[in-house]
């Protein structure tokens, strides 16, 4: 029984999340041969201020990228 926990920032629609989980379920079935009813997929969401990479939170990165688009060098 494959158990797949996906972590992602909040902001996707319920439809996007459902489509994603369905695709992950199908991928587990196709690659592992696991029966569809045995596959468990769930999403754990977090706020953009709760994740950091390279010393910058996701919220900070998004703000920096948005500012760069508004004021290209």
Image: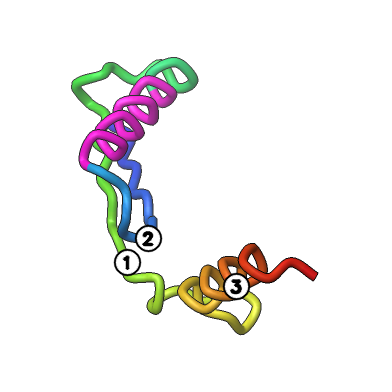
Residue 22 percent location from the top left of the image: 30, 26
Circle 1 Cα neighbour tier, 10 Å, few/some/many (<14 / 14–19 / ≥20): few
Q: Nearer the viewer, mark 1 or mark 3?
A: 3
How far apart are labels 1 and 3 at the CA level? 23 Å
Residue 20 location in percent, x, y? 35, 33
Whether label 2 touches label 3, CB < 8 Å: no
The C terminus sits in image quarter: bottom right
Q: Which residue is mark 2?
A: 9
Residue drawn at x 28%, y 17% as measured from the top left = 35
Vertical placement of residue 9 versus 23, above or below? below
Closer to us: 23 or 66:
66
* Magenta residue check for 42: no
SS under mark 2: strand
Residue at 21% over, 41% down: 14
Q: Residue furthest front?
A: 71
Q: Is residue 49 left or right of residue 45?
A: right
Quadrant location of the N terminus? Answer: top left
Residue closer to the observer: 63 or 31: 63
Judge whether 69 appears above or below 49 on screen.
above
Q: Which mark is residue 46?
A: 1
Q: Give the x, y percent position of residue 53.
A: 59, 74
The secondary element bearing badge 3 is classed as helix
* Extent of the magenta region: 14-28
Mark 2 to mark 3 CA distance (whole Å): 20 Å
Q: Which residue is mark 3?
A: 67
Q: Are marks 2 and 1 in contact (CB under 8 Å)?
A: yes
Q: Residue at x 62, y 67 (%)?
A: 70
């Amino acid at each position: 029984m494959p158990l797949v926990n996906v972590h992602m920032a909040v902001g996707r629609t319920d439809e996007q999340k459902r489509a994603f989980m369905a695709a992950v379920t199908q991928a587990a079935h196709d690659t592992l041969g696991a029966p569809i009813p045995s596959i468990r997929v769930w999403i754990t969401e977090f706020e953009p201020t709760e994740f950091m990479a390279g010393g910058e939170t996701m919220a900070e990165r998004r703000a920096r990228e948005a500012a760069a688009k508004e004021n290209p060098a």
